[in-house]
Image (cartoon, coloured by chain):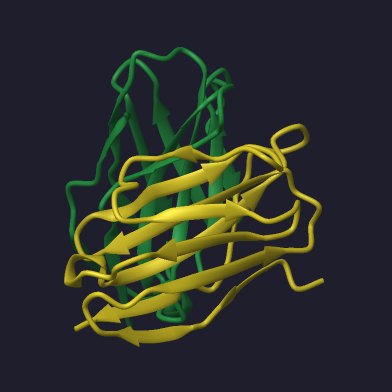
Amino acid sequence: AQTVTQSQPEMSVQEAETVTLSCTYDTSESNYYLFWYKQPPSRQMILVIRQEAYKQQNATENRFSVNFQKAAKSFSLKISDSQLGDTAMYFCAFMKQGGDYKLSFGAGTTVTVRA
Amino acid sequence: NAGVTQTPKFQVLKTGQSMTLQCAQDMNHNSMYWYRQDPGMGLRLIYYSASEGTTDKGEVPNGYNVSRLNKREFSLRLESAAPSQTSVYFCASSEVSTSYEQYFGPGTRLTVT
């Protein structure tokens, strides 16, 4: 099984500021996908952003962007212009390409946006 | 289009009781998954079904059984519940031929006393 590590259990950010969440993973695979999921207090899992390992360009979705460093096996998430609705737990996840497309999750980072 | 639905949303069981968690998806996805979420551990895969008629063990299958009833439905059964199975359970589905994104249900919070 792949190991995904999120070393920051909790983070707090002022509204409108930027916060960066870290994620590292351990794999011997060359082809894979990486994801960030958001879980607000409603408990619903929501896909925030995804990155294909073969793509060198970092993915961006509106205020969310990633810094993908394949050699370092690092996949951080940057939330810009933080909003109160960004308050949630964020999970980093790994999926090997091919096979059964199973997800391996990190332990999560709780992000609190302060007004 | 409801996506992925799960029933029940909450359940309390006594040790030794059995129950089945139901999951259904209306997106015509081939693959379905069951995860459990525990504090400080993220989501862990219990069982999955890559296609109708197939099921396979995930990372933490002990104490659980699954049935892929048809393409839409994938149930998770606890035969003899234990306090260690207190958790939040998520069902997910995906269609890997077109996209590898997994779509999650709203979860079931299960407490075993």
Q: Image height check: is B26 above or below A60?
A: below
Q: Image height check: is B36 above or below A3?
A: below
Q: Which chain is yellow?
A: B
Indicate the quadrant containing the C terminus of chain A: top left, top right, bottom left or bottom right.
bottom left
Indicate the quadrant containing the N terminus of chain A: top left, top right, bottom left or bottom right.
top left
Residue A52 appears in which quarter of the rendering?
Answer: top right
- Foreground residue, B56 or A85? B56
Which tint was used for chain A? Answer: green
Q: How far across and how far down the image is residue B47, in percent?
A: 46, 46
Q: How far across and how far down the image is residue A89, in percent?
A: 35, 66
What residue lies at 68% left-to-right and 56% top-to-bottom?
B69
Viewer can see residue A18 = no
Residue A104 appears in which quarter of the rendering?
Answer: top left
What residue lies at 28% left-to-right and 81% top-to-bottom?
B111
Is A23 left or right of A100, judged from the image as shown?
Answer: left
Is A16 left or right of B50, judged from the image as shown?
Answer: left
What residue lies at 41% left-to-right and 66% top-to-bottom?
B89
- Foreground residue, A71 or A26? A26
Q: How many marks?
A: 0
Viewer can see residue A71 = yes
Is A73 left or right of B3, judged from the image as shown?
Answer: left
Q: How far across and how far down the image is residue A35, in percent?
A: 48, 43
Is A107 left or right of A43, judged from the image as shown?
Answer: left
Q: How far across and how far down the image is residue B3, in percent?
A: 72, 66
Q: Image height check: is B75 above or below B44?
A: below
